[in-house]
Image (cartoon, rainbow, N blue to C red):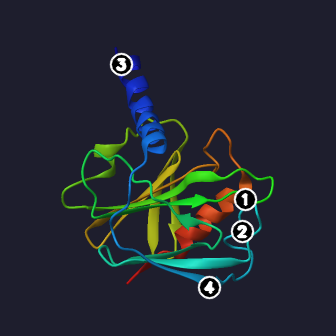
Amino acid sequence: MKDNLILIGIAIPFIIVLIWILLGGVNKNPITVNPGLKLEGSAGSTTNQQTGLGSFKDDKCNISFNYPTSWVASKNKLPLPQPPLFQITFDEPQKGNVQAKNSLFSYICFDANKYSFDQFFNQSNPGGGETIKAGNLAWQRVGNFSYTTVNGKLLILQMFFTKFDINSDPNYETTFLSILKSFRVN
């Protein structure tokens, strides 16, 4: 019985993401995206070796972060069990012979006074369980997810092809860590 519950806990997030990718939705929240911020050092590199960063700002949760300029804001919206304060997903378009990676990175913000990460995702998920210190923030990492709480906001990130993914790529891990380090409280 316990094994079945663990299996269900692992399968539910996977099924939600799969349905979200297949059905998609329109993101109706306004966003501020300012591409063109120059890359410093090698942070932010993707498998396409992009040379710049864009800046994303969430005015509802007072957070901003950098992302590769090659990424585009997706029209997809995660099918979450509770409405977030804000969410956005980024796609990496096809470049040459490299396939597009839809829904590559997602950012979700909830009211931390109402919700916790445990309410949405089963932490018995294999892979992860580490703490990442990035700037002034300490992120908890569970599989492809990382989360933290800032000023009463629960911030959840999901990125595929990172080190705990079945199809991991070190360049995406570097990009993900660079995004974490770029998070700023506005």
Residue that badge 2 annotates: 45
The disc, 1 or 2, on the residue closer to the chain's N-terminal end is 2
The disc, 3 or 4, on the residue closer to the chain's N-terminal end is 3
What is the distance, in whole Å, between disc 3 and disc 4 at their CAs?
A: 49 Å
Q: Secondary structure at mark 3?
A: helix
Decide: few, some or many residues near mark 3? Use Cα within 10 Å; few <14, some 14-19, many ≥20.
few
Q: Nearer the viewer, mark 4 or mark 2?
A: 4
- The type of residue carrying mark 2 is Ser
Q: Secondary structure at mark 4?
A: strand
Decide: few, some or many residues near mark 1? Use Cα within 10 Å; few <14, some 14-19, many ≥20.
some
Q: Secondary structure at mark 1?
A: helix
Residue that badge 4 annotates: 37
The disc, 4 or 2, on the residue closer to the chain's N-terminal end is 4
For the residues bearing labels 1 and 2, Cβ distance under 8 angstroms: yes
Residue that badge 1 annotates: 171
**Quadrant position of residue 52:** bottom right
Q: Is residue 14 above or below residue 73?
A: above
Q: Determine the residue located farthest toward the top in the rendered image.
A: 1
- The type of residue carrying mark 4 is Leu
Q: Indicate left or right for 44 with 147 as reference.
A: right
Along the line of sight, the residue nearer the viewer: 68 or 123: 68
Decide: few, some or many residues near mark 4? Use Cα within 10 Å; few <14, some 14-19, many ≥20.
some
**Quadrant position of residue 71:** bottom right
Residue at the spot x=48%, y=40% of the render? Answer: 22
> Residue 4 in the image: x percent, y percent?
38, 18
What is the distance, in whole Å, between disc 2 and disc 3 at their CAs?
A: 42 Å
What is the distance, in whole Å, between disc 3 and disc 1 at their CAs?
A: 37 Å
The disc, 3 or 1, on the residue closer to the chain's N-terminal end is 3
Residue that badge 3 annotates: 2
